[in-house]
Amino acid sequence: MLKYQMKKLMVATFAIALVACLGSVAFAEQAVLTVADCGKCHSVQPAQIAANGASHQTEIDCQACHEGHRPSSANNIPQCNNCHEGSAHYELKEDCLGCHNPHQPLNVTLTGEHKTVCVSCHAGPNKEMVASPSKHATFACNFCHADTHGNIPSCLDCHQPHSESMTQANCSTCHQAHKPLELTYPASTGSQLCAACHDSVFATLSASPAKHSQIACATCHASKHKTVPQCNDCHGLPHAQSMHDRFPKCGECHNVAHDLNNWPVKKKK
Ligand code: HEC
Ligand code: HEC
Ligand code: HEC
Ligand code: HEC
Ligand code: HEC
Ligand code: HEC
Ligand code: HEC
Ligand code: HEC
Ligand code: HEC
Ligand code: HEC
Ligand code: HEC
Ligand code: HEC
């Protein structure tokens, strides 16, 4: 149907209704517009409410919000805070209608940049960002959580992985989205993930016949990136005290942990 025909029909219907109203005024005290009438002239809003009205369908009806009607009542558009008060979210300065269509209140649209509003319900992520500054903390929340409320992006939407074999699921092993520079990881972290950047260490250790090659990177370099263990964290002082006094550095004989002078090949000689 053409827009103008639609308008014509609307006007015609309205006229008929008015005539009907006027007619009934002549006989009865007053003509009453009821909720059942709205759909006769308005199709969009009743359809939206029927599909996605949520509590605005189940708890209230059109007239709870739209009291009166033109021409007798010139402004029948309600304020949200007529009914919603008592929460930080409802006291926001921002335009409620910018995000909520009252006829489908939970189908939130996110245009513009938002942080304050999000934080009014999700305090946690922002606390993390403040406590652990990074470039992510400078972005609006919906720079990442874009378009629809609850959307969670993939890191790979914006970043390249550190190696070809690395997947989105791996990222959270070392990075948290809201504090990406806090590089911590669990003991179960696979050495292949470290190898993405430390390929030569990985190659040296893998080629070593010593028992250290059976140990994961994350077992020795535990929890936090750039943690470096001491040999005696695990071994104590295994040799005679007099020897340790003379050669305080284990590496003087054992070289680096990743190689151990290729132990036990040398030992066999
Ligand atoms: C006989 C047809 C008809 C019926 C029935 C009707 N409306 Fe309307 N309504 C109109 C028309 C036509 C306009 C547009 C008026 C204008 O633009 O000046 C309108 C405008 C509105 C507006 C816009 C606010 C405004 O003042 O511009 C709201 C809200 C509204 N109607 C709600 C309702 C509700 C709720 C019901 C049911 C209780 C209802 N209408 C029943 C024809 C109708
Ligand atoms: C929770 C309150 C609420 C309920 C319930 C509600 N509306 Fe509305 N309605 C609004 C608000 C607020 C606006 C103004 C929206 C805007 O300006 O974007 C509006 C706008 C309208 C308009 C004008 C649209 C326009 O573009 O000018 C019509 C018509 C309308 N509503 C009809 C209805 C009908 C019919 C129902 C019931 C099926 C209904 N509304 C239920 C709050 C409500
Ligand atoms: C006439 C009273 C009334 C008005 C006006 C009103 N609401 Fe509501 N709204 C309710 C009631 C009642 C509920 C259900 C109980 C609750 O969540 O408080 C509700 C629930 C909601 C919900 C949650 C829906 C759900 O099912 O969980 C949202 C979102 C909402 N309203 C947004 C708005 C916005 C935005 C406005 C202004 C455009 C508005 N409301 C205006 C009465 C109203
Ligand atoms: C930046 C977008 C945005 C703005 C602006 C906004 N809201 Fe919301 N609102 C949301 C989101 C997102 C939800 C959570 C919806 C859900 O639970 O799925 C929500 C939920 C609600 C609810 C549901 C009940 C609750 O507290 O969980 C109500 C009522 C509500 N908003 C009212 C308002 C009012 C009133 C305003 C204006 C003062 C407003 N909103 C402004 C995004 C917004
Ligand atoms: C009125 C309160 C409210 C507002 C405002 C709000 N949210 Fe939510 N949000 C919720 C609720 C309730 C859920 C669903 C429950 C849950 O999973 O925690 C949710 C879910 C989410 C989720 C998915 C969580 C998951 O584990 O799947 C993300 C992401 C999210 N919101 C981001 C945002 C962003 C970004 C904003 C600002 C644009 C925002 N929210 C505004 C209440 C809100
Ligand atoms: C740089 C992108 C980015 C920014 C900016 C961002 N997030 Fe997130 N957010 C994510 C990703 C990705 C996840 C999924 C969890 C993960 O992988 O660590 C997430 C998870 C969430 C979750 C669900 C899990 C949880 O931690 O509760 C909520 C809620 C959330 N974000 C809200 C917010 C809010 C509020 C803001 C703004 C203060 C924000 N986010 C800013 C990317 C971002
Ligand atoms: C919507 C895009 C987007 C998403 C999604 C996203 N990032 Fe970012 N991230 C950026 C941008 C933009 C920068 C800043 C780049 C620059 O300035 O060089 C950044 C910076 C970073 C930084 C460096 C921070 C700093 O302060 O130097 C790390 C680490 C990072 N992202 C990891 C991640 C991880 C891990 C995820 C998933 C949990 C993720 N990002 C999700 C856009 C995104
Ligand atoms: C095994 C741990 C680990 C995993 C898994 C990991 N990262 Fe990283 N990431 C790091 C370390 C360590 C740095 C810091 C490097 C530095 O200091 O230069 C870093 C830095 C970054 C940076 C900022 C510097 C740059 O390269 O632009 C981004 C972005 C990033 N990672 C994204 C990701 C993404 C996306 C994933 C998942 C595909 C991921 N990371 C998986 C450890 C990891
Ligand atoms: C995104 C690349 C990247 C990933 C993934 C990565 N690192 Fe690093 N790592 C670096 C960079 C860059 C340095 C600094 C190099 C320098 O200063 O010469 C570094 C330094 C180190 C250092 C040396 C600290 C020092 O003080 O000399 C250790 C130990 C280390 N990383 C262990 C690991 C472990 C274990 C993993 C896996 C859990 C890992 N790294 C994953 C990039 C990465
Ligand atoms: C996180 C604990 C840890 C750290 C730190 C550590 N080691 Fe070990 N090391 C082990 C374990 C476990 C073995 C295997 C023991 C076994 O199976 O008998 C081992 C074995 C050895 C062996 C015998 C190798 C073999 O193949 O039999 C030597 C030598 C050794 N470590 C020296 C060192 C030196 C030197 C350092 C410091 C540079 C060091 N370790 C740091 C845990 C550690
Ligand atoms: C002066 C050289 C020298 C120094 C310094 C030295 N070691 Fe050794 N280490 C040896 C030799 C030689 C062996 C092999 C002896 C053997 O088979 O009994 C050995 C064996 C070991 C073994 C394997 C024991 C076993 O039962 O298989 C460990 C573990 C070890 N050293 C740890 C350390 C640590 C930790 C330090 C520093 C605190 C250290 N060593 C300092 C020469 C040294
Ligand atoms: C048995 C414990 C152990 C294991 C397993 C281990 N490291 Fe180390 N790593 C050390 C120690 C101890 C040092 C300090 C240098 C030394 O004394 O050997 C070190 C030094 C480093 C350094 C800084 C110096 C350098 O060689 O570049 C990096 C980077 C590093 N390790 C990465 C890794 C990676 C990646 C893995 C896994 C592929 C790994 N390490 C496995 C104990 C270990």
Image (cartoon, helix red, strand yellow):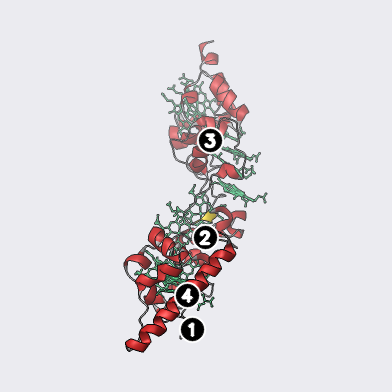
Residue 109 badge: 2
Give the quadrant of the C terminus: top right
Q: Is residue 139 above or below residue 61?
A: above
- Say whether disc 3 or disc 2 marks the residue closer to the N-terminus: 2
Quarter of image, res 193:
top right
Q: Is residue 253 at least partly visible in the picture?
A: no
Q: Amino acid at mark 3?
A: Thr
The residue wearing badge 4 is 14
Q: Residue 221, percent across and down?
A: 51, 38
Q: Amino acid at mark 2?
A: Thr
Q: Is residue 104 above or below residue 257?
A: below
Q: Amino acid at mark 1?
A: Pro
Q: Residue visible at 35% across and 81% down?
A: 32
The residue wearing badge 3 is 167
Q: Residue visible at 39% across and 83% down?
A: 23
The residue wearing badge 1 is 71
Foreground residue among 194 and 4: 4
Q: Is residue 195 above or below residue 92?
A: above
Residues at discs 4 and 2 in contact (Cβ within 8 Å): no
Beta carbon at label 4 within 8 Å of ligand 1 = yes
